Amino acid sequence: MNELIYRGKDLFRPSSLALIAGLLAVEGVVAGIKLGAAGVFFFVGLTVLVLAPLLYISYRSWSSVGPAGITVNWGVGQGRTYPWRDIQWMDVRETKARSSTSYAVRFYLPNGGRRTMPGLQHSGMYPNPSFGEQYQQVVRWWEHSTHPGSRVQPRRTLRDKLSPQVIGVIIGVVAALGIFVVMALRAS
C-alpha cells in the first residue's frame, strides 16, 4: 500500500482568507468610528497577532500513514510517529455547531489518549469532498497493520458524551450560580 499524506494547506480555500480579511475590515471600521486610529491599530493589530500564528501552524500541519504507523505534525517540529501496535481504535469525531458539522479522524492509544489527524478533516469552512474515502484508506492501513485482537474499542467517557454547547451551558450555569452566591453573601 502507498503511504498517505494529508496536509492542512490542502484544506484552505481562498474564500476563507477573504472572509478573514472582511472581518478585519469590519473590525477596523468599527474601531475607527468608536476609538479612532489608535483603536484601529490596537484591535486589528491584536487580532492579526493572535490569528497569524494560528493560521500559519494550521497551514503547516500534516499527518501521514505508512508502514511505521501514523505520524502527526501540528505545524511545529518533526512531528511524532505512533506505531501501529499503539493504535487501539480509530473513529471519526463529529462536532456539531449551530449550523454546521465538522468531522475529524482520531485514533486511540493504550493509555486512553486520543489524537486527531491534522489534514484529514471535513467541515463547512474546510470542505473535503473525499473525506470518507480517505478515512477508509487509513482504516485499511490500520486493519492491514494490526492484529484483530489488538483492536479494542474504548468505552465512552463523559468527555465523549458532552458536546461543546453542553459544556458551555454548564459553565454558564455554574458562573451564574457563583455570581448569585457572591451577591447573596454581600447582601447579608
Image (tube, rainbow, N blue to C red):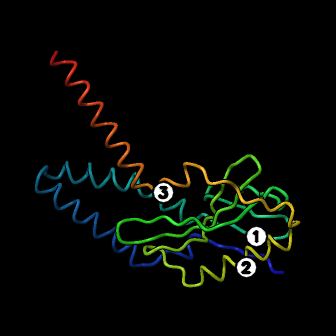
Q: Are marks 3 and 1 in contact (CB under 8 Å)?
A: no
Asked if residue 67 lies left or right of residue 134, the reply is right
Question: In this view of the protein, which residue sits in the foreground, 121 or 39?
Answer: 121
Q: Secondary structure at mark 3?
A: helix
Circle 2 Cα neighbour tier, 10 Å, few/some/many (<14 / 14–19 / ≥20): some
The residue beneath circle 1 is 65
Q: Which dot, 2 or 3, sits closer to the camera?
A: 2
Q: Which residue is mark 2?
A: 137
- Of the numbered discs 2 and 1, the one sitting upstream in the chain is 1
- Residue drawn where x is 21% and y is 65% of the image: 26
Disc 2 and disc 1 in contact, CB within 8 angstroms: yes
The residues bearing labels 3 and 1 have C-alpha atoms spaced at a distance of 24 Å
Residue name at image x 73 percent, y 74 percent = 138
Q: Position of residue 80 (x, y in %)?
A: 74, 55
Q: Quadrant of residue 154?
A: bottom right
- Residue 132, image x, y percentages: 62, 80
Report the Cα–Cα distance between label 2 and label 3: 29 Å
Residue type beneath disc 2: Gln
Q: Earlier in the sequence, mark 3 or mark 1?
A: 3
Dot placed on the residue nearer the N-terminal end, 2 or 3: 3
Numbered mark located on residue 54 in the image: 3
Q: Residue 102 or 22: which is nearer the viewer?
A: 102
Crowding around mark 1 (Cα neighbors within 10 Å: few <14, some 14 to 19, many 20+) is: many
Choose top left, top right, bottom left or bottom right for residue 184.
top left
Which corner quadrant of the image does residue 83 belong to?
bottom right
The kind of residue on which mark 3 rests is Leu
Residue 105, percent from left and from top: 63, 67
In this image, 54 relative to 104: left or right? left
Please name which of the two marks, 3 or 1, marks the residue nearer to the observer: 1
- Residue 110 image position (x, y, % from top left): 77, 50
Q: In which quadrant will I find the N terminus? A: bottom right
Element type at marker 1?
A: strand
